[in-house]
Image (cartoon, rainbow, N blue to C red):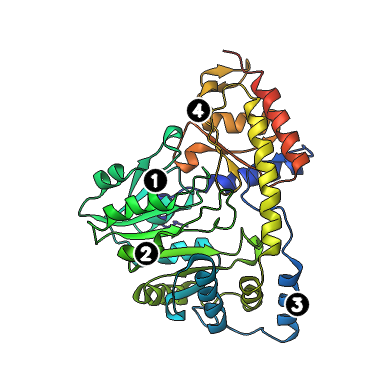
Amino acid sequence: MQLSSLLNRFSEPETLKMARLGRELRAQGIDITDLSLGEPDFDTPQHIKEAAIKAINDNWSHYTPVGGYLDLKEAVCAKLLRDNDLHYAPENIVVSTGAKHSLANVVLSLIDVGDEVIIPTPFWVTYAALVQLAQGTVKLLPTTLQTGYKITPEQLEAAITPKTKLFMFSSPCNPSGAVYRKEELAALVAVFARHPQVAIISDEIYEYINYCSCHESIAHFEEVKDRTIVVNGLSKGFAMTGWRLGYIAAPAALARACEKLQGQFTSGTNAIAQRAAIVALNAPLDATKLMVTEFTRRKERVMELMRGIEGFEFAEPDGAFYAFPCVDHYFGRSDGTDVINNADDLSMYLLNKAHVSTVTGSAFGDSRCLRLSFANSMPNIEKGFEKIKTALAKLGS
């Protein structure tokens, strides 16, 4: 059987690969501490679960409209107005099977062969893969620890060409935790204003998980709102990863295009998840705030633990639930068996020798770093970092 060449355009996401390898070792009876997966370790709040149970009992069991139930679209609009001061109508909203699905809809609706897509690094693993699927050209803009993992207006201006069709970024960022302040977004908007052909995807899935109360959406700037696509969902802020529900807020013409595309891939999103999402979006955010309080506590402990590890250089994240230390201090070192040449090697060394699952920074466009998730219990975090510290100490110069 000859498989499609499409499969050669992209690789398995490293995040899912490490989760798979961790499961395989765990199945062999090895005690793996998971610091790799970007999934809140909290259960879905009770009021959302009760809404889903009610939806089942009320027989919400039939096909759903491709773009989502109207009252869910209205709930999304109300949320965007309440939390972001953004005015949208239901015609601007498309509900999909997770924010990843939303991103795929947008990229495949916008990008043709040879179109350039600018992506600041580090970036979430799927961004580049989606562009490759669409046969676009990925143009990475590197950032550094010294710049807080944010691009400058000068970088953006220099990267844009007549072929540039799209700019994709997340704030708060997975994996760096960087959050763009309002004045920083304003400086980027001034550049975009000179290049009206460039659309903008603003991935805001970690919106609620920020530690600086500084989340801003680039869609708030009128100069670019008519070409900005806000992507969000319920996975992170509501501990609903398995419910698979994301959404976009976009110009109406693009929303219709995404709905047309989705009609051929999946049709409408799960009915029960949609009814529960209405309750999640309309209810007070008390449960979300409790999660963020705990993530804040863990983040502070992780920063403390990383300060105790020789050679780790890092910025304190302003959002999301990851640490992203630069680990090139260990490149060229060996424990007598394994030689660490790069972050890929170090991630596999920690998995096989320390039995801690991490993700190599090369998956996110920065080959000097590791991504360490603190979406795990405090005992597991402390256990994992102790195992990491012990294993790294065995790497000689």
Residue depicted at 76% across the width and 84% down the height: 57
Q: Quadrant of residue 152?
A: top left
Q: Count how many numbered circles sit on residues in the image.
A: 4
Q: CA distance from mark 1 to mark 3?
A: 41 Å
Measure how far apart labels 4 and 1 are at the Cα level.
21 Å
Question: Tag 4 or tag 3, which sits nearer the N-term?
Answer: 3
**Amino acid type, residue under disc 4 in the picture:** Asn
Q: Please indicate whether residue 331 sits to the left or right of residue 138 in the image.
A: right
Element under disc 3:
helix
| Res. 53 mark | 3
- The single residue placed furthest to the top in the displayed view is 397
Residue under pointer 2: 228
Name the residue: 47% across, 74% down. 94
Labelled disc at residue 342 = 4
**Label drawn at residue 120:** 1
SS for dot 4: loop
Under circle 1, the secondary element is strand
* Label 4 vs 1, first from the N-terminus: 1
Report how far apart the C-alphas of labels 1 and 2 lie in the structure: 16 Å
Q: Position of residue 289 (x, y in %)?
A: 67, 58
The three-letter amino acid code for the residue at tag 1 is Pro
Q: Mark 1 and 2 residues: CB-CB less than 8 Å, in contact?
A: no
Side of 36 where 249 appears, left or right = left
First along the sequence among labels 1 and 2: 1
Count residues near mark 4 (Cα–Cα under 10 Å), then give few for <14, some for 14-19, many for 20+. Answer: many
Q: Residues within 10 Å of mark 3 (few under 14, many from 20)?
A: some
- Residue under the image location 43 percent in, 58 percent down: 202
User: x, y (%) of residue 294?
Assistant: 71, 49
Query: Distance from label 3 to label 4 (Cα)?
Result: 48 Å
Badge 2 element: strand
- Figure check: 30 above or below 1: above
